Each structure stands twice: as C-alpha cells, then as structure tokens.
Image (cartoon, rainbow, N blue to C red):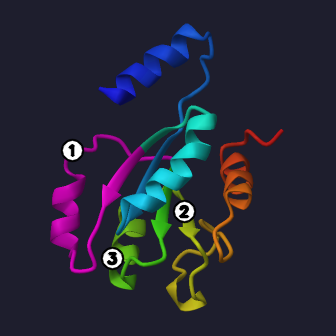
Amino acid sequence: MVRLLQTVLYCIQGKMEKQITIRIFSLTREIYKLISKVLDKYSFIHEFVQLSDVDTAASLGEKLKDFNTNPEIIILDKEIPSALKEDIIGRYNGSSVICLPSLNESDIISAGRVNQISEPLRLSEFEKVILKLTKKDK
C-alpha cells in the first residue's frame, strides 16, 4: 500500500523517471530507521527485511516470497552471517550491493557489485554512495 502511494505521489509530481527500489536486510530495525531518513529525502521506494542470525536459505525464501520484483539496490547490515549474505547476493544477480558498514574482504563476493561504507556508519557517506548508484549525483 505504501509503495502504491509513493508511486502515485511520484506521478502527480510529474516525474516520470523510473522509481528506484531499495531492499534493506538487517538484524535490527534501527539500521533501517536510520538510513530511511536519507532514502525518504530522495523518494526512493525502500523495503525492510528483518533477519535473525539463525535464518537459513529456506527461511530467507519464506521472508522474500511476498516481494514480486527485484530491487535495483540491496543493502546488507554487517551483522548478517556470511552464508546468508552470500545467499542474498546470489538471489539478486542484477542488483547493486551496499554493505553497512564495512565488511572484511573475505565477505566480499562480487567486488564489482559491492559498495562498502566505512565504519562507523556516516549518513553523508551513505548518501553519496546511494546517489552515485542511482545516478542522482549530478
């Protein structure tokens, strides 16, 4: 429902460019609330998937079954177990990836697709990466 309202609002404003969908994966809602402030500033559609450190590929599939489209960008919290990160990245082959904050090099799967945010998380740095990925930094 929220996504429909965002799309209608976007069309009313006369902006016909493609809407960017961003899916955030985290063990806590706090990360989502924090970065939502930046995403809302640019009217990005954002979706939250709350994970637990005991989630498996099967339980992840269950949590994702209601999402009908692939997002342009996925955001991963650093606390997500490595095996689950690999599964998430593998499910979204065409999506850009942002890791919050930095990950160890051993966690990086497809370096060309992964954008790391340094630790500690700074919203200004996060905003620059989002704008670069969505080509709104011009």
The quadrant in which the N terminus is found is: top left
Give the label on residue 66, or none. 1
Q: Is residue 27 left or right of residue 45?
A: left
Three-letter amino acid code at the position of disc 2: Val
Mark 2 — residue? Answer: 97
Q: Is residue 103 left or right of residue 135?
A: left
The answer to whether residue 23 is above or below residue 90 is: above
* Residue 13 forms part of the magenta stretch: no
Mark 1 or 2 closer to N-term?
A: 1
Q: Where is residue 6 in the image (x, y as percent from the top left)?
A: 45, 24
**Residue 116 visible:** yes
Q: Is residue 1 left or right of residue 80?
A: left
Location of residue 115 (image quadrant): bottom right
Q: What element carries label 1?
A: loop
- Please name whichever residue, 124 or 62, is drawn nearer the observer in this view of the structure: 124
The answer to whether residue 122 is above or below residue 7 is: below
Location of residue 55 (image quadrant): bottom left
Q: Residue at x 69, y 51 (%)?
A: 127
Three-letter amino acid code at the position of disc 1: Asp
Question: What stretch of residues is rendered in magenta?
Answer: 47-72
* Residues marked 3 and 1 touching at CB (< 8 Å): no
Q: Which residue is drawn at 62% across and 75% down?
A: 111
Mark 3 — residue? Answer: 84
Q: What element carries label 2?
A: strand
Q: Is mark 3 on a helix, strand or loop?
A: helix
The quadrant in which the C terminus is found is: top right
**Residue 92 visible:** no
Three-letter amino acid code at the position of disc 3: Leu
* Residue 48 forms part of the magenta stretch: yes
Circle 2 crowding by C-alpha within 10 Å: few under 14, some 14–19, many from 20? many
